[in-house]
Image (cartoon, rainbow, N blue to C red):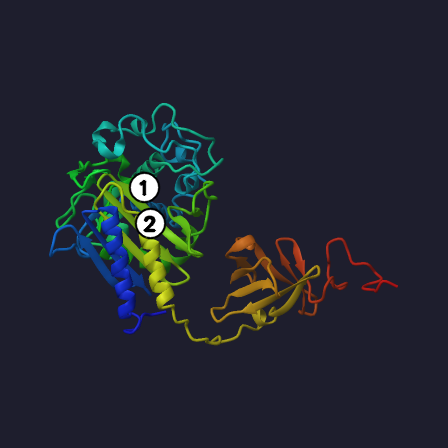
Amino acid sequence: MDATSEDLVLLPATRRALVHRIAVAQRDGRAPSLVAAVVRDGEVVWEGSRTMVEGHGPDGNVQYRIGSITKTFTAVLVMRLRDEGLLRLGDPVEKFLPGTGAGEVTVGQLLSHTSGLAAESPGEWWERTAGTLRPELSDVLGEQPFRFEPGLRHHYSNPGYTLLGSLVEALRGKPWEEALRAEVLEPLGMERTTAQPVSPHAGGWAVHPWADVMMPEPLEDLGLMAPAGQLWSTTGDLAKFAAFLVRGDARVLSAESLREMRTSATPPEPGLAELGYGLGLQLAQSGGRRLIGHTGSLPGFLAVLWLSEADDVAAVVLANCTSGVPVSTVAADLVAIVAEAEPRVPEPWRPLREADPVALDLCGPWYWGTSAQAVRLTYDGFLELGPVGGNGRAARFRPEPDGSWTGLNGYYAGERLQAVRRPDGSVSHLDLGSFVFTREPYDPGAPVPGGVDPQGWRGIG
């Protein structure tokens, strides 16, 4: 839904609640500065900041280092390569980067952190040392790069995203940073997102855990590790990125590919509040709300971008301290404040411009065995299949040129739905991944697997 002027103005009580939340976060977290923004319907509707400097505060144009939010940008570059047909997610990385010692790992496993690679690079703490200490991929991976068998489990890996950055460079024939700027940042108008800090930018600080004193953190160029965490950005630029992650942009990546990125590709680690990890995106749960985005940290900086697709609300929080501020919780709270105080006004119901008689013929009740299901045709031309009254498998289906339908979510994601017709053209039954849906429970006139008792339905007598 396009934002109206009313959508872009929050109520005074909502704005005050947002200011209060970041004020408490900056004070309790003892952050030198904190800046935040809220996006609704793709537009910035609120910006705020708190700082230790009296009479001055950062705005949406001040750069902070965003750490692992960089990984989402790298993932977008890789998905572009996939959509161009230059790679498949199931391709082994050896196909593009021979001799790394991690060749059996697939591109998809790297994106979803299921490669089994170590969480960190061997040697000195890579986030606080110069990238020149790791000039080759072999230096990033080490002699024993694996902690688990590939595909066995989710294990967050910074070296894994280093490999993805090198893969981009190999296929594009240019540095990762150049590819990112030309293919993502410039089309989205993200002029204040850079690999190196550009004034105005915040300095990174370490705040003493037991005293109200602080010291500056070193600002290192991460070298080959850059695709895992190098970027600097602003709340203004990340607000644009948040809108893109939901809506897509034909110049960068389609909404369909972004939906794929937002879909869980791996279960969460036990004990974490996360819902899992998609393809370059973290999935989290907060107050019953599904959040999508990424967190980031490097010495001296904390960052997070969370968005609620259902509410079409996103929040960005950036701080210039090594620890102390629970930015992930703060951003989730900012989303909740807006979504709950000013819930999204739904779009008006609209009928189809032109009813497809073939699709219309599939609407109504169907039965999978004795389970009552219903098919609806929605205004966008898609089909919805779900149980009648009660819990069960539900999914949306996209029409295909051959007359079939492809599942988009849930159990039936990727599965093919087709109407099987009788010689006279009428629909006999629906076939969905070998499941037969009939107009009557166990319809004897349809090819129900296992057949139907010839005596039909009967009572106890």
Q: Residue at x 67, y 63 (%)?
A: 367
Residue 330 placement (x, y as % from top left): 31, 53
Note whether residue 160 is visible. Answer: yes
Q: Are marks 2 and 1 in contact (CB under 8 Å)?
A: no
Vertically, is 58 above or below 137? below
Q: Residue at x 43, y 75 (%)?
A: 348
Q: Residues within 10 Å of mark 1 (few under 14, many from 20)?
A: many
Q: Residue at x 46, y 33 (%)?
A: 150
SS class, disc 2:
helix
Residue 104 placement (x, y as % from top left): 44, 32
Q: Quadrant of the C terminus?
A: bottom right
Q: Residue at x 81, y 64 (%)?
A: 457
Note whether residue 188 is visible. Answer: no
Residue 443 placement (x, y as % from top left): 74, 64
Residue 410 placement (x, y as % from top left): 53, 54
Answer with mark 2 or mark 1, whichever residue precedes in sequence: 1
User: To which residue does mark 2 refer?
Assistant: 328
Q: Amino acid at mark 2?
A: Ser
Q: Amino acid at mark 1?
A: Val
In the displayed structure image, the side of residue 348 where residue 252 appears, left or right: left
User: To which residue does mark 1 refer?
Assistant: 168
In the displayed structure image, the side of residue 338 where residue 441 appears, left or right: right
Work out how far the residue at label 2 is from the one at label 1, CA to CA, in angstroms: 29 Å
Q: Residues within 10 Å of mark 2 (few under 14, many from 20)?
A: many
For the residue pair 320 and 134, the one nearer the viewer reads as 320
Vertically, is 106 above or below 310? above
Q: Name the quadrant containing residue 347.
A: bottom left
Q: Quadrant of the N terminus?
A: bottom left
Foreground tag (2 vs 1): 2
For the residue pair 161 and 393, the one nearer the viewer reads as 393
